[in-house]
Image (cartoon, rainbow, N blue to C red):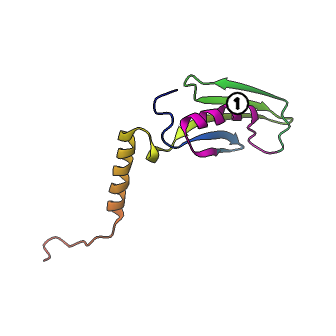
C-alpha cells in the first residue's frame, strides 16, 4: 500500500441493515488512506452498529480487495452483518484525472443552474 496512499481524503464507511432500512456511518473524515486503513482494522474489532449490544461472538471476513471487511456480530437477541470499507472523497482524489473530471462536472452543473436571459426566437 504505497504510492499515493498519503494523498486525498479518506474515510471508513460502516454499512448495516436495521429493520427495513440500510444505514451507514462515516469515520475519520479527512484521513489519509493509511490512517483510514488503520482505523478500518481497529473497527473490525470494536465496531457495534447499535449501542447496548451484548456481544456474544464476532466473525470478521476480509474481502478480496483487502480494503473491505464483513463483520458478523451475534448479540443476545440478534445477528448483525456490517460491511466496513475505506473510501476516498472523489473531489479531493489523489488521482488528478478524477479530481479534474469532478471539477469540470461541478463547473458545468453551476453553469447550467446559473440565471441567464432567454430571448425568444426571432425577437431582437
* 61 part of magenta stretch: no
Q: Which residues fall within the magenta stretch?
A: 26-51
Residue 103 relative to residue 50: left or right: left
- Crowding at label 1, few (<14), some or many (≥20) Cα neighbours within 10 Å? many
Judge whether 79 appears above or below 26 on screen: above
- Going by the picture, which residue comes out furthest to the top? 64
Q: Secondary structure at mark 1?
A: strand
Number of dots carrying numbers = 1
Judge whether 110 appears above or below 76 on screen: below
**Residue at figure coordinates x 46%, y 33% from the top left:** 4
Q: Nearer the viewer, residue 6 or 108?
A: 6
* 40 part of magenta stretch: yes
Residue 64 relative to residue 83: left or right: left
Q: Say which quadrant the C terminus sits in.
A: bottom left
Q: Nearer the viewer, residue 113 or 95?
A: 95
**Residue at figure coordinates x 75%, y 35% from the top left:** 46
Name the quadrant containing residue 58: top right
Name the quadrant containing residue 63: top right
Q: Nearer the viewer, residue 87 or 76?
A: 87
Query: What percent of the width, then of the height, locates residue 17?
Result: 68, 40
Query: What percent of the width, then of the height, locates residue 89?
Result: 50, 44
Judge whether 12 appears above or below 110 on screen: above
Judge whether 23 appears above or below 81 on screen: below
Query: What percent of the width, then of the height, locates residue 66?
Result: 58, 25
Name the quadrant containing residue 116: bottom left
Q: Which residue is labeled 1 in the image?
A: 71
**Residue at figure coordinates x 74%, y 25% from the top left:** 59
Amino acid at each position: 500500500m504505497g504510492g499515493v496512499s498519503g494523498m486525498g481524503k479518506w474515510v471508513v464507511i460502516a454499512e448495516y441493515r436495521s429493520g427495513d432500512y440500510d444505514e451507514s456511518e462515516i469515520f475519520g473524515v479527512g484521513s489519509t488512506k493509511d490512517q483510514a486503513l488503520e482505523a478500518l482494522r481497529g473497527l473490525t474489532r470494536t465496531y457495534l452498529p447499535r449501542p447496548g449490544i451484548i456481544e456474544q461472538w464476532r466473525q470478521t471476513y476480509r474481502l478480496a480487495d483487502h480494503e473491505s471487511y464483513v463483520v458478523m456480530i451475534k448479540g443476545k437477541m440478534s445477528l448483525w452483518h456490517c460491511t466496513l470499507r475505506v473510501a476516498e472523497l472523489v473531489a479531493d482524489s489523489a488521482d488528478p484525472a478524477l479530481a479534474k473530471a469532478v471539477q469540470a462536472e461541478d463547473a458545468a452543473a453551476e453553469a447550467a443552474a446559473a440565471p441567464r436571459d432567454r430571448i425568444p426566437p426571432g425577437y431582437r
